[in-house]
Amino acid sequence: MSNRPAEVSLEVNPAARLDVIDVGQEIREQHGHPDVASYYRGIAHWPRFLEAVWGRISPLIDTAPYKERKRGLLAASRNTVLELPLPSRSEILQRGLTEEQVAELRAILAVFRFRIISDMFLEVSLIKALLDGPENARSSRFSFARADRQQAPKGESSF
């Protein structure tokens, strides 16, 4: 038996492109993102799957549990960053950035931090749960994290 993953064929259905455009517009509107996130663009190669995934995820986005988990992710990332040695604001300005550039960078990073990345973490986990079941959404064979709290299945590390 081969260890190679099964090949997955892309759908090539021109009529499905219109459905993908509609779903993409819904995703942008519901999240307030400037564009459709790359994980949804990747899934769009399978339009029926994208529609099914979005149909299951979209009702969760404005719920209290989703918002609570998003706040938790943001708090955890903030706490982690505060433990790192960071340059001071004066050091940043000494490296040639102007106050205006700092403000622009701050705005760009805020979109990623508060909207795009936190949504990505939650929704990719939800998609994995849809594909592999909720318990398997807690682990990844690509993780480098130590499995201190639970023993992951062979070939996978828990995160």
Image (cartoon, grey):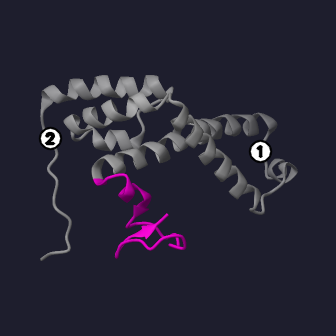
Q: Considering depth in this image, is 97 or 31 the residue closer to the camera? A: 31
Please give the name of the residue rendered at 64% of the width and 37% of the height, measured from the top-left corner: 110
Please give the name of the residue rendered at 55% of the width and 32% of the height, measured from the top-left corner: 64
Q: Considering depth in this image, is 89 or 120 the residue closer to the camera? A: 120
Which residues fall within the magenta stretch? 132-159
Specify which label sits upstream in the sequence, 1 or 2: 2
Find residue 74 and report its image quarter: top right
Disc 2 marks a residue whose amino acid type is Glu
Location of residue 140 in the rendering, given as x and y in whole percent from the top left corner: 40, 63
**Dots 1, 2 in contact, CB < 8 A:** no
Q: Considering depth in this image, is 149 or 57 the residue closer to the camera? A: 149
Disc 1 marks a residue whose amino acid type is Leu
Quadrant location of the N terminus? Answer: bottom left
Q: Considering depth in this image, is 98 or 134 the residue closer to the camera? A: 134
Location of residue 109 in the rendering, given as x and y in whole percent from the top left corner: 63, 41
Q: Which of marks 1 and 2 is in front?
A: 2
Mark 2 surroundings within 10 Å by alpha-carbon count, few (fewer than 14), some (14 through 19), many (20 or more): few
Location of residue 148 in the rendering, given as x and y in whole percent from the top left corner: 54, 73
Disc 1 marks which residue?
97
Examine the structure image and report whether residue 153 is included in the region drawn in magenta: yes
Q: Establish if 17 lies above or below 87.
A: above
Identify the element where label 2 is drawn: loop
From the viewer's perspective, is 130 left or right of 148? left
Find residue 126 and report its image quarter: top left
Q: Establish if 114 lies above or below 130.
A: above
Assign the magenta stretch its main secondary structure: loop
Location of residue 89 in the rendering, given as x and y in whole percent from the top left corner: 84, 48
Identify the element where label 1 is drawn: loop
From the viewer's perspective, is 48 left or right of 112? left
Examine the structure image and report whether residue 90 is included in the region drawn in magenta: no
Disc 2 marks which residue?
11
